Image (cartoon, rainbow, N blue to C red):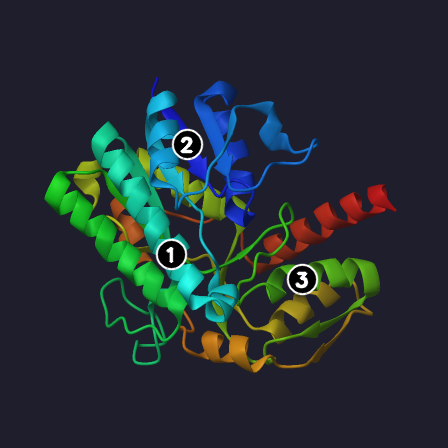
Amino acid sequence: MPRVLVTGALGQIGTELVGAARERYGVDSVVATDIRIPGPDSPLNLGPFEQVDCTNERRVHTVVERHRIGTVYHLAALLSAVAEEKPQVAWEINIGGLYNVLEAARESGCAVFFPSSIGVFGPSTPTEGTPQVTIQRPTTMYGVTKLTGELLCDYYHSRFGLDTRGVRYPGLVSHVAPPGGGTTDYAVEIFYSAVRHRRYTCFLGPDTRLDMMYMPDAIKAALDLMEADPGRLSHRNAYNVTAMNFTPSELADAIRKHIPDFEIDYEVDSVRQTIADSWPDSLDDSTARADWDWSPSHDLEGLTTDMLDKLSRRLKTRS
């Protein structure tokens, strides 16, 4: 059976994708990779792991060939806020790393999953129900690299017949891995602060509306798309997917249903607020629903209940 390789396996998506893929395909069939080494208690150690810097072309090729990889989930990247601080590094990692993965896949004949983002849109994009195909003029380095990645994957599919697929993720919320420098990190931090301190200071304004998704749905989207019948796919590397839509104020209200004394205040970070304001308020994901039966399982109430339950158990255990 062809094996799966996950880059950026210690990141927010990678941590959970590796576990889900090992459950679905078998522990020994999923090779986790990251530029960092997992700690001694990391679940990544339960199966094969390789230290890989995706900007090292030879290393990427070697690991893909050695493990006879059939599908690469290429998750290694700098996220939006960090990419604005280090734009040159972001280009080198986000595009240089993707290029190396695509070249290794071309030579080995394996498929590639590339996660894009709502960051590929900009202020000139329709903000409500942003369609599958629309104007894309991102104003951040993160958005530029994700849009370039979409086009690069499209090129490798049309030019070399490479099986490339991907989705445009909204903001992602996870209780497993800590935030990694994204503009929507508040939607993770707020739960930790609610459980620990009953209050949170948010770096986005109270009425900043964005589409969001709980991590189990994000993982399901990736795995299901890579297993979908290619004959049904009208797009390859840029499927809009979403699950729910809320503002920081609405999320705080949802938390108060479980923690009535929770308080929130706001100290707006101008850099991240500007990034968030350049993104759509909501996405239209009807094409994904039609092409490969995409459907999320969690709404705002389900997300809130599960996050608070999981974090309360974990933090109580550690205290």
Q: Are marks 3 and 1 in contact (CB under 8 Å)?
A: no
Instruction: Write down the residue under mark 2.
Output: 5
Q: Which of labels 3 and 2 is toward the front?
A: 2
Q: Is any part of residue 12 visible from this angle?
A: yes
- Quadrant in the picture for the N terminus: top left
Residue type, mark 2 in image: Leu
Give how far apart the Cα atoms at labels 2 and 1 are: 21 Å
Residue drawn at (48%, 47%), measured in percent from left and top? 217
Sooner in the amino-acid sequence: mark 3 or mark 2:
2
Residue lying farthest to the left in this orientation: 159
Q: Residue 138's spot in the image, x, y percent?
A: 33, 72
> Which residue is at the front of the view, 248 or 37?
37
Whether 307 is drawn above or below 244: the answer is above
Left or right of 186, for residue 117: left
Which sits in the foreground, 240 or 55? 55
Mark toward the start of the polypeptide (2 vs 1): 2
Q: Callout 1: helix, strand or loop?
A: helix
Q: Position of residue 174 (x, y in %)?
A: 60, 51
Residue 75: give x, y in percent of width and height.
Answer: 43, 46
Task: Look at mark 3 in the image and give the residue it sits on.
Answer: 189
Residue type (three-letter) at the residue carrying disc 3: Glu
